[in-house]
Image (tube, helix red, strand yellow):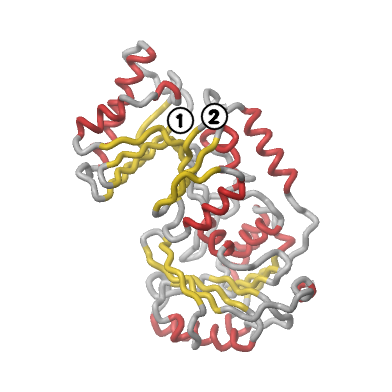
């Protein structure tokens, strides 16, 4: 077994959620920075992190880190790294993405081409060849230069981890699966409690909650690039991780999760997505407007991503939606609501000041995670209310 440093990028503002996930998987956290968590692990950790982490965007195998203020320094620093330990002779390798922040080197295309040349030069020396076919497995690199410090990672995931494989269709302003999972993990919701999303769109919150409740790993139904890296990770390692994942699934659990949307077409899409995620039996989707938001039971949770001005609709229609949402929520006097929105007027329209508010970046957009907290259920009633 090798010991690697692994980097897991995530949404800005949600590093603590990812850190807890990694810790719960049993790995040592070595560094937490804006938008990423670094941890130590072996080959098995690469498999398990890809399969089990709900809030990471991808898993990078850190190859090296060095300072570079000139392209010469970038070339020499890259060439000095032991590429032959990671990329086989026939491997296809390229710098898939280069990001520069507060650094003297800032042209992504120049960074990419210089680093590619440096890796080729290193591999020429190590493999005693003048040319590489690159017909084998893919080894894409992702590079970040922050304040002139170059960090290089091999992308073990391939497609971003938010692409679970169940969501073929989305609404106008979908929330990613990784962000939805992180927001649910920021709440005290558990599978014994009622969960309603009154603006469910393609069903992401409801499906992610059901996956959590059934303990279905988010990467269960997809593949990862490192599955082809026979030089680093054996097929046996992947097979054993998949067996661990299957053994942990709780099929017999029964949850009360509901998703409503005013658009009947979106409800149909949500149902199809839930079927692909193999959680359809756990979720009741229904075409219903927010004015019909009501529930007979107590101590439930609303977790939702309502429409907001920057992406959907006019400010007037946004005001009407939030006002109606607030009115219906007031009748659910023992419930809690968790709302992500880019609208700075959400509390005003909703008619109540949030008990907590957290800033989270959804891509480049700054959003607010408003938390309107209801009373805790009396001891012993936690389970009864949802049965």
Kindly report the distance in space between the C-alpha atoms of the residues bearing marks 2 and 1. Answer: 8 Å
Residue name at image x 44 percent, y 71 percent:
368
Residue at the location (55% across, 67% down)?
201
- Residue 208 in the figure: left or right of residue 64: right
> In the image, residue 147 lies at what x, y percent?
26, 47
Query: Which residue has dot 1 on it?
Result: 138
Return the x and y of residue 134 as percentages of the image width and height: 41, 23
Q: Which of the 4 quarters of the picture holds residue 224?
A: top right
Q: Is residue 150 left or right of residue 201?
A: left
Residue 291 visible, this orientation: yes
Crowd around label 1: few <14 · some 14–19 · many ≥20 (10 Å): many
Task: Please identify the quadrant where the C terminus is shown.
Answer: bottom right
Return the residue nearer the eye: 69 or 108.
Answer: 69
Q: In the picture shown, does residue 293 fall above or below 166?
A: below
Residue 126 position within the rendered picture, expressed as x and y whole percent measured from the top left:
37, 15
Residue 334: quadrant of the picture: bottom right
Q: How many marks?
A: 2
Image vertical order of residue 239 relative to residue 11, above or below: above
Which mark is on residue 228?
2
User: Does residue 178 sit above or below 122 in this rendering?
Assistant: below
Q: Nearer the viewer, residue 203 or 211?
A: 211
Q: Quadrant of residue 116?
A: top left
Q: Are marks 2 and 1 in contact (CB under 8 Å)?
A: yes
Q: Classify residue 270 as left or right of residue 377.
A: left
Residue 278, which numbered label? none
């Amino acid at each position: 077994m090798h010991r690697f440093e692994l980097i897991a990028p995530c949404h800005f503002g949600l590093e603590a959620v990812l850190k807890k996930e990694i810790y719960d998987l049993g790995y040592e956290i070595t560094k937490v920075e804006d938008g990423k968590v670094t941890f130590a692990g072996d080959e098995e950790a690469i498999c398990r992190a890809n399969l089990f982490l709900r809030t990471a965007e991808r898993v990078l195998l850190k190859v090296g880190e060095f300072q570079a203020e000139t392209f010469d320094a970038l070339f020499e620093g890259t060439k000095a790294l032991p590429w032959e330990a990671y990329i086989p002779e026939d491997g296809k390798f390229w710098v898939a993405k280069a990001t520069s922040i507060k650094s003297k080197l800032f042209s992504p295309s120049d960074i990419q081409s210089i680093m590619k040349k440096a890796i080729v030069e290193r591999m020429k020396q190590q493999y005693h060849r003048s040319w590489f076919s690159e017909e084998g497995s893919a080894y894409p690199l992702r590079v970040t230069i922050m304040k002139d410090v170059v960090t290089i990672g091999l992308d073990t995931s391939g497609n971003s981890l938010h692409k679970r494989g169940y969501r073929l269709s989305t609404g106008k302003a979908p929330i990613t699966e990784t962000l939805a999972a992180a927001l649910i993990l920021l709440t005290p919701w558990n599978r014994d409690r009622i969960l309603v999303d009154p603006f469910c769109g393609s069903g992401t919150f409801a499906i992610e909650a059901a996956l959590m409740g059934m303990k279905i790993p988010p990467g269960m139904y997809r593949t990862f690039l490192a599955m082809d890296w026979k030089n680093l990770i054996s097929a046996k390692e992947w097979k054993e991780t998949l067996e661990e994942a299957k053994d942990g699934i709780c099929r017999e659990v029964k949850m009360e999760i509901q998703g409503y949307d005013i658009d009947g077409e979106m409800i149909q899409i949500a149902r199809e997505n839930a079927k692909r995620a193999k959680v359809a039996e756990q979720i009741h989707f229904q075409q219903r407007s927010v004015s019909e938001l009501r529930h007979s039971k107590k101590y439930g949770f609303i977790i939702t991503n309502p429409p907001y001005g920057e992406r959907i609709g006019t400010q007037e229609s946004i005001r009407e939606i939030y006002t109606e949402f607030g009115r219906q929520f007031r009748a659910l006097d023992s419930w809690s609501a968790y709302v992500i929105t880019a609208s700075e007027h959400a509390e005003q329209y909703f008619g109540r000041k949030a008990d907590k508010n957290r800033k989270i970046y959804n891509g480049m957009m700054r959003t607010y995670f408003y938390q309107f907290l209801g009373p805790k259920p009396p001891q012993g009633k936690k389970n009864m209310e949802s049965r």
